[in-house]
């Protein structure tokens, strides 16, 4: 894995990677694959000792061969008989979210000034991404904040045809800022279109959209309309619905 956070963030990623693998395998198996004694691996996991830079790079490479992040996410999803997606197992597992954020968000390091997220289940993940990238974060809500005198707003159309409005305080979203939209799921892209409009109204630059799960392909029009990339860790079929 190409890590550009520096040594400290690399250690955080290593520990979360080891934690996820420990959920799947016994220490003796992990030891046989890494050549590290189980007692030492346990001390790495609990932060009692820290591997040197060369060793941590080698261990990350070895451990990543034992874990497929896409499969891990898919195995954590539940889909009911009506095709509704339940991703609660992922978004309530902060350790897993930390692992995903550390694994995927390094590619944006130094490229943005702000993370923007809708006030939905994606907020914990967006918060972690902002934390690891060292950037501020703004949450777009469906109501105006008391005490905030100036808002930017954009309308979005829900699946049932109703219209709702997204609001952000005008101050934090500054002109010229490079903004990454982060969420847990994208399906139709309508909410994310509204977020892009908020960014543009502020005179800021929509850098792209980063999500854990993309459902179907309806959202793809955003890539052409706004000339931005949409990055999803996992892509799922068209028939699913977002619960």
Image (cartoon, rainbow, N blue to C red):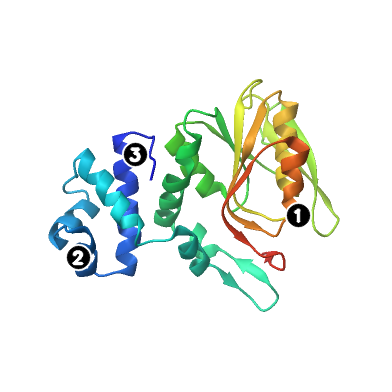
Between the C-alphas of marks 3 and 2, the distance is 26 Å
Nearer to us in this view, 29 or 203: 29
Identify which residue is drawn at 51% across, 35% down.
108
Where disc 2 sits, the SS reads helix
Distance between mark 3 and mark 1 Cα atoms:
35 Å
Where 6 sits versus 128, above or below? above
Q: Position of residue 233 (x, y in %)?
A: 54, 53
Q: Residues within 10 Å of mark 2 (few under 14, many from 20)?
A: few
Q: Percent x, y for residue 170?
A: 68, 26
The residue at which mark 1 appears reads as 218
Assess whether mark 2 and mark 3 are in contact (beta carbons under 8 angstroms): no
Question: Are the residues flagged by discs 2 and 1 in contact, CB closer than 8 Å?
Answer: no
Q: Going by the image, does 238 lie left or right of 88?
A: right
Q: Nearer the viewer, mark 3 or mark 1?
A: 1
Who's the residue at 86% across and 56% down the image?
161
Q: Position of residue 209 (x, y in %)?
A: 62, 42
Neighbor class of circle 1 (other Cα within 10 Å; few <14, some 14-19, many 20+) is some
Q: Earlier in the sequence, mark 3 or mark 2?
A: 3
Residue on which disc 3 sits:
9
Q: Earlier along the polypeptide chain: callout 3 or callout 1?
A: 3
Helix, strand or loop under label 3: helix
Q: Which residue is mark 2?
A: 32
What is the spatial separation of the Cα atoms under label 2 and label 1, in whole angstroms? Answer: 45 Å
Please report the residue visible at 42 percent of the width from the left and 45 percent of the height from the top: 102
Q: Is residue 129 above or below residue 212?
A: above
> Tags 3 and 1 in contact by the CB under 8 Å rule?
no
* Residue at position x 30%, y 50% in the image: 60
Considering the numbered disc 1 on the image, is that residue within a helix, a strand or a loop? helix
Residue 147 x, y percent position in the rendering: 65, 30
């Amino acid at each position: 894995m190409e890590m550009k956070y520096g040594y400290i963030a690399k250690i955080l990623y290593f520990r979360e990677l080891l934690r996820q693998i420990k959920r799947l395998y016994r220490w003796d198996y992990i030891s046989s694959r890494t050549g590290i004694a189980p007692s030492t691996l346990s001390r790495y996991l609990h932060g009692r000792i820290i591997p040197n830079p060369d060793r941590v790079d080698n261990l990350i490479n070895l451990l990543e061969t034992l874990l497929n992040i896409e499969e891990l996410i898919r195995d954590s999803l539940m889909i009911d008989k009506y095709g509704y997606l339940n991703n609660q197992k992922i978004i309530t597992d902060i350790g897993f979210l930390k692992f995903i954020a550390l694994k995927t968000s390094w590619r944006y390091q130094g490229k943005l000034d702000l993370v923007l997220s809708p006030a939905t289940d994606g907020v914990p993940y967006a918060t972690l991404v902002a934390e690891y990238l060292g950037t501020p974060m703004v949450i777009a809500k469906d109501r105006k904040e008391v005490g905030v005198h100036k808002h930017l707003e954009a309308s979005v159309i829900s699946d049932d045809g109703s219209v709702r409005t997204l609001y952000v305080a005008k101050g934090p979203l500054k002109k010229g800022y490079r903004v990454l939209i982060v969420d847990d799921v994208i399906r139709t892209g309508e909410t994310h279109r509204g977020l892009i409009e908020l960014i543009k109204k502020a005179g800021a630059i929509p850098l792209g959209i980063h999500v854990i799960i993309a459902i179907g392909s309806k959202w793809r029009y955003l890539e052409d309309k706004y000339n931005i990339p949409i990055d999803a860790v996992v892509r799922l079929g068209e028939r699913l619905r977002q619960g």
